[in-house]
Each structure stands twice: as structure tokens, then as C-alpha cells.
Amino acid sequence: QPLQQPQRPVEERPEIPPESQEIEELQELQQREIQKLRQSICLRQAELQAVAAAQPLAPFLEELHQQRAELQELQEVQARRVQSELREMEELREQQAQQLRELR
């Protein structure tokens, strides 16, 4: 929060010389710059907090990726096994058809 000078009632204010007005403008500019810096610091802190909050997820995500890879590998093994069994069944079917033809 910018520091505010206690303001005197209008009738008590002396006439401001140009140098003082320039100084006041510079001070206001400085205050705005300080405010911008504070806002950017707050944003950066929020970003860092988000990153810090995500850190505990890293090992979990790593494990999840590992499990996913294992699952994919198991699915591929299962698919090969099913293909192999289908080929065997097809070969048996052909043998049975051949035997039936020979019996007729």
C-alpha cells in the first residue's frame, strides 16, 4: 500500500513552488513504479506457489507414466497372445475341415 501523506485542509496549503511540484510528480511516479513492482512480485510469488504445489505431484505422475507403460506392454503381450490363439484355432479348423473331407 502506498504511503499517504496526511493532507492538510485546502486553506492551510501553501503555494507549491515549481520545483516542489516536480518533486511531487517524481514521487508519484516512484510510488506507481513501486506498486507495479509489488504487483509483479505478488504474481511471481503466486507462480512459485503453484510450482511448489505441483511438486508433490511429480513422483505420482512419474509412477503413473510407469504404470501406463507397463499396462501398454501388457496389452501388447495380450494382443500377441490372442493373435497366436486365433491362428492356432484357425489351423485346427482347417485340419478338422481337411479330416472331414478325407472321411467323406
Image: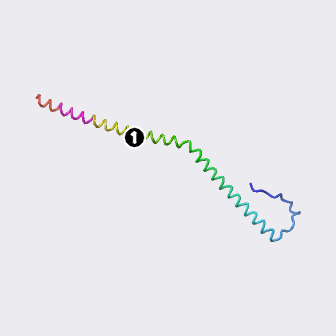
Vertical position of residue 78 compared to residue 45: above or below:
above
What crowding class fits label 1: few (fewer than 14 Cα within 10 Å), some (14-19), or many (20 or more)?
few
Q: Quadrant of the N terminus?
A: bottom right
Position of 44 compared to 14: left or right?
left
**Rendered view: 60 above or below 26:** above
Q: Position of residue 54 (x, y in %)?
A: 56, 45
Q: Position of residue 10 (x, y in %)?
A: 86, 62
Q: Residue furthest top?
A: 103
Look at label 1 and name its amino acid: Gln
Left or right placement of residue 34 versus residue 88 in this view: right
Residues rendered magenta in the picture: 86-96
Dividing the picture into quarters, in which one does residue 57 lie? Answer: top right
Q: In the figure, 40 relative to 25: above or below?
A: above
Residue at 51%, 40% in the rendered image:
60
Magenta region, main secondary structure: helix
Report the residue that reaches farthest toward the bottom.
Answer: 18
Query: Could you tell whether 39 is left or right of 74 in the image?
Result: right
Return the residue at label 1: 72
Q: Tell whether position 92 is magenta.
A: yes
Residue drawn at x 70%, y 61% is: 33
Specify whether residue 32 is painted magenta: no
Who is closer to the viewer here, 60 or 39? 60
Q: Quadrant of residue 67?
A: top left
